[in-house]
């Protein structure tokens, strides 16, 4: 199955970044956050969950428009809350790029 960009759930690295406050856009508790996640790390975590996704490296989180951190579009098989929770848990096991 391919991901329809119109219906896909969007995941930004800022949702999982330990350095970002809840007010600024982090969506997971500090204990579940990681320091400096990248869009490619999110992509690997979503793939490890067995979901179809698209990596877009040229996009910027609206709150941090000046940083081109990228985003991941995910097929909507789960609710966004469940997806964020599962990806946060999986990010802890994804190897960090050198």
Image: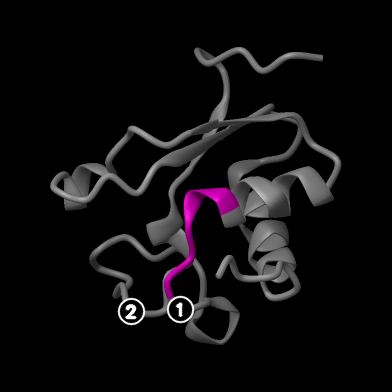
Identify the magenta region: 36-40
Quarter where residue 80 is shown:
top right
* Quadrant housing the N terminus: top right
Residue at coordinates 79% horizontally, 36% vertically from top-left? Answer: 51
Contact (Cβ within 8 Å) of mark 2 with mark 1? yes
Residue at coordinates 34% horizontally, 49% vertically from top-left? Answer: 69
**Residue 16 percent coordinates (x, y):** 48, 66
| Other-residue count near label 2 (Cα within 10 Å), few / some / many at <14 / 14–19 / ≥20 | some
Residue at coordinates 44% horizontally, 56% vertically from top-left? Answer: 13
Residue at the outermost front position:
98
Residue at coordinates 75% horizontally, 29% vertically from top-left? Answer: 52
- Whether 37 is among the magenta residues is yes
Using the image, tell me which numbered label, if any, was put on residue 19: 2
Q: Is residue 72 above or below residue 2?
A: below
Using the image, tell me which numbered label, if any, was put on residue 35: 1
| Other-residue count near label 1 (Cα within 10 Å), few / some / many at <14 / 14–19 / ≥20 | few
Which secondary structure lies at badge 2? loop
* Quadrant housing the C terminus: bottom right
Q: Is residue 66 above or below residue 1?
A: below
């Amino acid at each position: 199955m391919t991901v329809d960009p119109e219906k896909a759930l969007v995941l930004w690295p800022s949702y999982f970044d330990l350095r970002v406050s809840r007010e600024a856009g982090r969506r997971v508790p500090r204990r579940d956050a990681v320091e400096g996640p990248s869009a490619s790390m999110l992509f690997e975590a979503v793939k490890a969950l067995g979901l179809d996704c698209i990596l877009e490296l040229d996009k910027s989180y609206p709150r941090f428009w000046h940083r081109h951190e990228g985003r991941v579009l995910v097929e909507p098989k789960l609710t966004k809350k469940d997806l964020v929770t599962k990806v946060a848990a999986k990010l802890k096991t994804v190897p960090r790029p050198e």
